Image (cartoon, grey):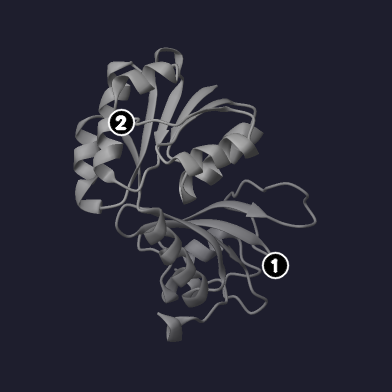
Amino acid sequence: MYLIIVGAGDIGGQLIEIAIEAGNEVVVIERDSARADSVAGDHDCLVINDDATVKETLADAGADRADGIISTTEQDATNVMVSLLAKEFDIPSILSVVHNTDHMNLFREIGVNTMENPQELIAEHLYRSVSRPAIVDYLRIGDVAEVFEITVAENAPIAGKTLKEAADTGLITADMLVVAIERNSAGEPITPRGNTEIHAGDLLTVYSAVGATPEVTDIFGHDEDHLA
């Protein structure tokens, strides 16, 4: 994939390394000369030390043949302008970081895929790690719903029950769904069925329309309401 990355700061710098290691052909546009020199010295890719909000700069970066462009600068105004120019080149995939959530609709209106403020996402993830330590990983869906991974404790109410039994007794409600099960002895993920029995030590991927509330995590043997 031919990928243009705009900005080589904290976000862009890590993205550049990931994209190159994945075997992509990467072009970096960075306005700051020190950052541009650093990237050029550390990575085997084309680095353009120029302003990405100028159409000629994107042309020099090969925007007419790019498969995707990701704008990661610290300024939403810059990211918007880069995205608008990218659309003029008909780049198939356009993604931008958005620092101010009030600007999200603007990016969506011009048809750009977005990732909201990475710093806020990191902060939220750190808080979740300390307030809900039983949850291995999670993904927010909308304002409330979440998909999360959680390990079943020895004393969990759901341990030893089939999914049907758990649903019949009200442990698993209509707002919840066990999506996948990882069990050490199985060696590969188990596709949950009604007659699948949940074991202590299972790592479950769970969807909850009400989020990973203490009432939900209690089902898997994790009493964390004191950290809510």
**Does residue 80 appear to the left or right of 17 in the view shown?**
left
- Pick the residue in front: 131 or 214: 131
Front of the two marks 1 and 2: 2
| Disc sitting over residue 82 in the figure | 2
Q: Quadrant of residue 221?
A: bottom right
Residue 143, given in percent of the width and then of the height, sits at 29, 57
Q: Can residue 65 be seen?
A: yes
Q: Quadrant of residue 165?
A: bottom right
Q: What residue type is labelled 1?
A: Gly
How dense is the environment of label 1, judged by Cα within 10 Å: few (below 14), some, or many (20 and up)? some
Q: Determine whether 48 is above or below 75 in the image.
A: above
Residue 55, given in percent of the width and then of the height, sits at 30, 21
Residue 213, given in percent of the width and then of the height, sits at 41, 71
Mark 1 lies on residue:
201
Name which residue lies at 64% across and 27% down. Answer: 23
**Does residue 183 appear to the left or right of 155 in the view shown?**
right
Q: What residue type is labelled 2?
A: Val
Query: Which quarter of the rendering shows the C terminus?
Result: bottom left
